[in-house]
Amino acid sequence: MMIEISFTGRGGQGVVVASQMLGLAFFKADKYPQCYSVFGGERRGAPLASFLRVDDKKILLKCEIENPGEVICFDASLLDVERIRTQLKPGGRILINPPNPAEAFSDLAGYRIGLIDAPAVARKAGLEKIYNTVMVGAYCGFTGIPDMASVLAAVGEMAPAYPEKNVAAARIAFDQVTSFS
């Protein structure tokens, strides 16, 4: 069954690299990924989106992902509850880097919610402000896919700097992600 993931965040948080990194992790797990990004002005702090499709067979679709089954949100201020309700598939999963406790997301009842304090995990691993590897590790811990060995291999290969710290961040996030329905 095809997995469709929507990533949302701000320029400079590592959203595009995270989608590519997760795509590589799925590829290393013998899946077929398809990744693309959408953004306007290429500047730090501007909202942007990236998308990833994954399947067990070659993906022939070449259209936008309009109704993902999963959302990865790097910045909770960009989380639009109405948009989630109209676009995310019923029972879908949402991974959020929140500034707020779990109770703040009670209006997302009916979805499986994963929470990770990405800044804290990044600091613990010796990184600052870029959360791509944290979110990729948290996604693996939250969903159980792809396998952690594939995630760590992709992170180690794609981390633009400090591969050891980025691998550590992914491992920590895998263990620290919390979830609820």
Image: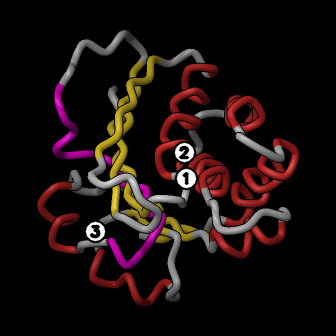
Query: In terms of depth relative to the viewer, which is nearer, 177 or 43?
Result: 43
Q: Percent x, y for residue 107? A: 27, 82
The secondary element bearing badge 2 is classed as helix
Q: Circle 2 is placed at which residue position? A: 18
Q: Residues within 10 Å of mark 3 (few under 14, many from 20)?
A: few
Q: Percent x, y for residue 136? A: 60, 48
Residue type indicated by callout 3: Gly
Query: In terms of depth relative to the viewer, which is nearer, 113 or 173?
Result: 173
Residue in the image at 39% along x and 22% along y: 55
Q: Which mark is residue 110?
A: 3
Mark 3 vs 2, N-terminal side:
2
What is the quadrant of the C terminus in the image? bottom left
Q: Nearer the viewer, mark 3 or mark 1?
A: 1
Residue in the image at 65% along x and 68% along y: 129
Q: Percent x, y for residue 52? A: 38, 35
**Label 3 – label 1 distance at C-alpha:** 28 Å
Q: Which residues are magenta?
A: 63-78
Residue type indicated by callout 2: Ala
Q: Nearer the viewer, mark 1 or mark 2?
A: 1
The secondary element bearing badge 1 is classed as loop
Mark 3 vs 1, N-terminal side:
1
Q: Judge from the rendering whether residue 39 lies leftward or rightward of residue 56; answer left or right.
A: left
Classify 26 as above or below 95: above
Q: Nearer the viewer, mark 3 or mark 2?
A: 2
